Structures are given as C-alpha cells and as structure tokens.
Image (cartoon, rainbow, N blue to C red):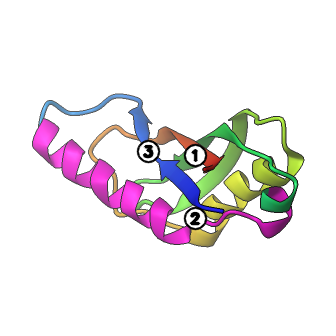
C-alpha cells in the first residue's frame, strides 16, 4: 500500500510586498511541516483519508501560540494528527512583517 501526503502553507494576514522573501519563508514552513508529517497507522488500516485545515497563530519570533482545526476531515484520528503536527514543530522561522497566522491544509491519501 503506497501513501501520498501533502502539506502546504497558505499565509494569511498582512504580507509585505517582498514576495520572494515571503515565498522563501513559506517554503521553510512547508518543509518543517513535511518533516513532522506522519500518517497514523490506525487511520491507514481503516482506509481513512482526507484534508484538514489548521490555523496556526504565532508571535513575531515565529513561536506557535495557537493551533485551531478550522476544517476537519471525516476522521477523528487525522484531525488530531493535523493539530499534533503543529505542536511538534513548536516554532517557525520568524515570519515576514505583519504575518501573525497561517492556514495549513494537510492531506492524507492512500494510493
């Protein structure tokens, strides 16, 4: 059984016009999420798939100050894992000026 997984960060909030800097920051955030991603074995066994969206708030240093599930999958296991991924990370690189939150879609798919 092959697994496919994706995580992408969609930044929300006031973002500076320096798009190259923002893109580099988003890439670092996406890499941190990918590095901490896991597909719970119990969800795999049950054939559970889906995409959860998690809102992450942070301070100016990048320290995660809040995690909220804003769009759930049909799987309680995957929903908990989406939030757990963010708490494992703990902190992102300092965000671009004005960015205080981001919404991260995290997808689990069996293939």
| Boundaries of the magenta span | 19-43
At 33% from the left and 51% from the top, the residue drawn is 95
Of callouts 2 and 3, the N-terminal one: 3
| Secondary structure mostly taken by the magenta-highlighted segment of the chain | helix
Which residue is the site of mark 2?
37
Label 2, residues with CA under 10 Å away: few <14, some 14-19, many ≥20: many
Separation of marks 2 and 1 at Cα, in angstroms: 9 Å
Which residue is the site of mark 3?
8
At 83% from the left and 35% from the top, the residue drawn is 74
Q: Are marks 2 and 1 in contact (CB under 8 Å)?
A: yes
The picture quadrant where one finds residue 85 is bottom right
Q: Which mark is residue 11?
A: none
In the image, residue 74 above or below residue 41: above
The picture quadrant where one finds residue 73 is top right
Q: Secondary structure at mark 2?
A: loop
At 38% from the left and 40% from the top, the residue drawn is 99
Which residue is the site of mark 1?
106
Q: Residue 32: percent from the left, percent from the top?
A: 43, 65
In the image shown, does 71 or 61 lie closer to the viewer? 71
Count of all numbered marks drawn on residues in the image: 3
Of callouts 2 and 1, the N-terminal one: 2
Q: Residue 24: percent from the left, percent from the top?
A: 20, 52
Q: Is residue 95 magenta?
A: no
In the image shown, does 93 or 61 lie closer to the viewer? 93
């Amino acid at each position: 059984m092959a697994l496919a997984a994706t995580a992408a960060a969609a930044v929300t909030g006031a973002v500076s016009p320096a798009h190259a800097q923002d893109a580099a920051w988003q890439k670092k955030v996406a890499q941190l999420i990918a590095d901490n991603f896991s597909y719970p074995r119990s969800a795999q066994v049950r054939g559970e798939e889906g995409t959860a969206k998690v809102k992450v708030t942070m301070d100016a240093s990048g320290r995660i100050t809040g995690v909220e599930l804003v769009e759930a999958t049909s799987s309680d296991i995957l929903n908990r894992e989406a939030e757990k991924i963010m708490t494992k990370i703990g902190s992102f690189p300092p965000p671009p000026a004005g960015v205080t939150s981001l919404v991260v879609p995290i997808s689990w798919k069996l293939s």
